[in-house]
Image (cartoon, rainbow, N blue to C red):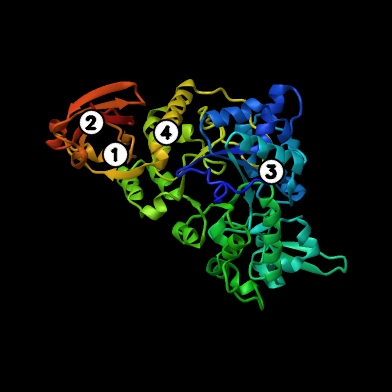
Amino acid sequence: MPPPLDSPSNPSLRAHPHLYEINAWAWLESLSRREGRNLTLAEVPAGEWDQLARLGFNLVWLMGVWQRSPASQQIFQANSPSFPQYDRALPGWRLDQIVGSPYAVHAYVPDPRIGTWKDLDSARENLRARGMGLILDFVPNHTALDHGWVGAHPEFFVQGSAQDFRNDPAAFYSLESTAGKSRLIAHGRDPYFPPWRDTAQLNHFNPSARAALLAELRTIAKHCDGVRCDMAMLVLNDIFSKTWGRFLGGFDPPAQEFWTEAFAALPGFLWLAEVYWGLEYRLLELGFQFTYCKGLYDSLCSGRPQDIYAHLLADSAVRSSVMHFLENHDEARSAAVFGAERLPAVAALFATAPGMRLYYQGQLEGRKIHLPIELATATDEPSDPVISALYEKLLKISNQDTFHAGEWKLLAVQAADDLTAPNLIAYQWRSASAWKLVVVNLGAVASQGRVQIVDEISSASQYSLRDELNDATYTWKGEDISRGGLYVRLDAYRAQLFDITSA
């Protein structure tokens, strides 16, 4: 078993890494159509892994490799409110193409459509041979309704009374035992949303349930370099108690957080957290290396530069540990959300901001159709050559060492003759060998301002500013910059990525 990516024996995971998320089932379906035969993970053409390495990705998250639940499949096959989404993603879909949610795990073994443990290990070996690590899913909060534990160990799950069921029948699942006694198993849930009807809620205050989950983690860890932990904040002791406390009977909160036990069980493993509600820093303090940064995504969607600036001002300890994204399997496609007009600025900021940068399968091609995760495949959609070219450039630039090993600094932008300067976000990356300056215009109008790099400029020198994104070079005298800053003017929703050298 290769050492974990972030262990002292294998310190290959660079700072501010690039992560590529793949919907494993849909990806294999697409590759199988192209190749004219049914492929498993072990049969993925080498060129697919080569392409990810060429683009500079450090980690690949194969989303949805675990065995799908027949119960989840049946629930979604009968879920008519989802049918319009299926129609958009896969016109003319068939019932057998609804395969259930990957987050209602039937068992932590590879689904037969994905392959075997040996096939999964083959994919990992292909990634490691190209300098990349493998991330898999871990769902701590719940299992599928038909997971083996539900029948064999119903005590692992939160249960309700007959009165609880009458009060909220959609929140429970009736489990009939061989002795004719029924148990009312709670469905998993986020307390701010309706229950997930294809899941069974684990009781995180039951030591035996925790021990069983940790055993599953130890098995998973033999086949990957890290895990992305689904809804990681739901199993924090206080959150869990607030959500489920009145259903837990004699179970008291454990002395330790579940995550503390998990990190101790697997030292050197890589932990990524899906987390919301402002709990990112708390999970980082517990030991997660990276957490979702939904706040920046929401601010980019709303288009308010002042909100985006505020997020970039976050504590430096958090800044390098957040996971930025413009899309993932839960969110709408970024090409549809931002459109061709806004995407150049938004993508440039995302690609060069500090922290982990999460790209989703299809994002680089400008796909606009969102694929519901319970569908096996999506309709073929042509790539957008303009968006593809944009990301090709951004990845080439942001893979330079300075954007990973350098020091990041947010810069002030002062007004220059009008009131448009607040539309501009500027920051720099500096290392011993290079100086990069990023300026993005998040406004709907051409905007200008003076970027404050005066303290880092020698008035006696001359500077060359090569815009690597737009293939243009500008020459500035240090004394001119010293008078008030570097003057920039950008058209609406455009970006400039400068390499600065002293002539």
Q: Amino acid at mark 4?
A: Gln
Q: Which residue is mark 4?
A: 400
Q: Which residue is mark 3?
A: 65
Q: Which residue is mark 1?
A: 426
Q: Amino acid at mark 3?
A: Val
Q: CA distance from mark 1 to mark 4?
A: 18 Å
Q: CA distance from mark 3 to mark 4?
A: 32 Å
Q: Which residue is mark 2?
A: 488
Q: Is residue 375 visible?
A: no
Q: Are marks 1 and 2 in contact (CB under 8 Å)?
A: yes
Q: Secondary structure at mark 2?
A: strand
N-terminal label among 1 and 2: 1
Q: Secondary structure at mark 3?
A: loop
Q: Amino acid at mark 1?
A: Ala
Q: Quadrant of residue 23?
A: top right
The residue under the point 40% across, 55% down is 317
The residue under the point 60% across, 65% down is 261
- Packing grade of label 1 (10 A; few <14, some 14-19, many >=20) is many
Q: Position of residue 77 (x, y in %)?
A: 72, 43
Q: Is residue 368 left or right of residue 197?
A: left
